Image (tube, grey):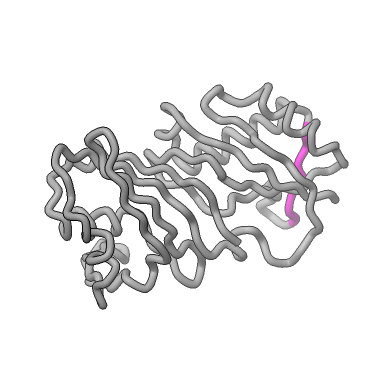
Amino acid sequence: MPRYVITFSKKGYIKYTSHLDMIRLFKRAFNRSGIFLEYSEGFNPHPKMSFAQPLSLGYTASGELLEFDTKEAFAAGEIKKKMNSNMPGDIRVLDCVQIEKEKRSLAAKCCAAEYRITIPCSGSLPDNTEKAFMAQENILVLKKSGKRKAEKQIDIRKMIRSLNIKERNNNIILSTILDAGSNSNLSPELLIKAFVDFAGIEAEREDIEVHRVQIFM
């Protein structure tokens, strides 16, 4: 059966839709579009559809990836048109391509992701903030893990692939590429915590915006 990958954006209030609800939303959109997905076999069959990387609640994005298998072939442009006519306005399918089937999924191939983090700040940072932050041999933060959510100190320095800092309209904008995959994964939340503490910025977390620009394979 044919396999496709769509690239889509997510913005506005839809950013408060959970990952599980996004799965349900896409399933319904495929059904309404007359695009019937291939299902797995076994006692609990499920549609062959998966996101490259789940997007955290409250994040917007412009380059999310979803791969899926269909029961019959469609023109990629037809899938894009059909899906956009059956999706909420805050989700737009930007592209659709047919790909060769492989054993490894997009999720397995994912290795990094680019984010744009906007932090409100009335003051200005020292000119050397970006260089000084990245020059640290270790960047230690507390991470909650396990069923009991116990805090554990981890070093995130090697998981930050790049960081660029700009100031615009009383905002500090971090453009960063972070590890994102099964081998190594860094949540933007840990980078935010580390950077805010390092720079001495007083900002409420709910006022900080996170946008995922793209995912790298």
Q: How many marks?
A: 0
Dominant secondary structure, magenta: loop
Image coords of residue 151 (percent x, y):
21, 66
Image coords of residue 176 (percent x, y):
40, 56
Specify whether 203 is left or right of 74: left
The structure residue drawn at horizontal position 78% and vertical position 37%, both measured from the top left corner, is 36
The structure residue drawn at horizontal position 23% and vertical position 57%, both measured from the top left corner, is 195
The structure residue drawn at horizontal position 53% and vertical position 40%, both measured from the top left corner, is 62
Depth check: give the residue in front, 180 or 20: 180
From the image, which quarter does the C terminus lie in? Answer: bottom right
Residue 145 quadrant: bottom left
Image coords of residue 72 (percent x, y):
87, 41
- The boundaries of the magenta stretch are 35-41
Q: Is residue 107 visible?
A: yes
Specify whether 59 is left or right of 89: left
Residue 146 quadrant: bottom left
Query: Residue 166, relative to residue 185: is it above or below?
Result: above
Residue 208 quadrant: top left
Image coords of residue 138 (percent x, y):
25, 75
Depth check: give the residue in front, 211 or 145: 211
- Spot the residue most to the bottom: 137
The structure residue drawn at horizontal position 85% and vertical position 37%, both measured from the top left corner, is 75
Query: Residue 208, relative to residue 78: is it above or below?
Result: below
**Does the magenta-highlighted stretch encompass residue 46?**
no
Q: Is residue 206 visible?
A: no
**Does the magenta-highlighted stretch encompass residue 36?**
yes
